[in-house]
Structure formats: structure tokens, C-alpha cells
Amino acid sequence: MDGRVLPVLLGPTGHPPKWYEIPVPTPDGGPPTVLLYERVPAGYSKRLGLQKGWKYDFRPTGTKPKPRWPWTKTPRQP
């Protein structure tokens, strides 16, 4: 990135968003490229196993996974 700090809005539970999208403008004026970052745990403490916080990992594919609902079944292979 270019060193700017972007504000991250917190949800009602106080957590940052699971996915963060950053639009990067193209030099030729076309549609912006969207960089996708996923929120992951920053680590765990050794003694109690508590989470230390969050960090964002870059997802080079640029696509979010589809939500999997518990009441839907995956199609069976023949």
C-alpha cells in the first residue's frame, strides 16, 4: 500500500469486518482493481490459548467464498 491509514468500522459486536476490500484506481482510468483481505487471528497466547487480536491477510484470488448455510446439503457425487 502507499502508507495511508484507512478507518475500519466496527460491527455491533466490536469486531472489524471479516473481509476488507480496497479499490485501487488504474492509471488508464478504467475500472479499479479490488484488493481483498481476510480477517484472521493474529495469534494465541501460550498459557491460556487466548486470541491476541486480528490481522488482515491478502487473498490473491480476489473472490470471497460463498456462505455455507447449515440447512443446505452438498450435492452427492454419482
Image (cartoon, grey):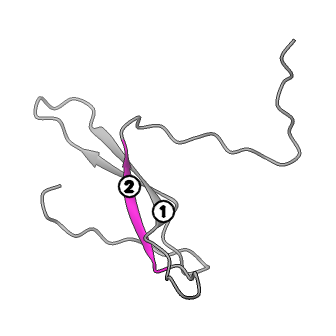
Q: Position of residue 4 (x, y in %)?
A: 16, 66
59 above or below 43? above
34 above or below 17? above
- The answer to which of 5 and 77 lies nearer the viewer is 77
- For image coordinates 27% across by 68% down, the residue present is 6
Quadrant housing residue 68? top right
- For image coordinates 87% across by 11% down, the residue present is 78
- For image coordinates 41% across by 34% down, the residue present is 61
Q: Residues within 10 Å of mark 1 (few under 14, many from 20)?
A: few
The secondary element bearing badge 1 is classed as strand
- For image coordinates 48% across by 71% down, the residue present is 16
Q: Position of residue 42 (x, y in %)?
A: 43, 70
Q: Quadrant of the N terminus?
A: bottom left
Q: Which residues are magenta?
A: 52-59
Mark 1 is on which residue type? Val
Between marks 1 and 2, how big is the CA–CA gap?
7 Å
- The answer to which of 4 and 46 lies nearer the viewer is 46
The answer to whether residue 12 is left or right of residue 64 is right
Residue located beneath label 2 in the image: 57
Residue located beneath label 1 in the image: 40
- The answer to which of 35 and 43 lies nearer the viewer is 43
Q: Are marks 1 and 2 in contact (CB under 8 Å)?
A: yes
The answer to whether residue 30 is left or right of residue 64 is left
Quadrant housing residue 66? top right
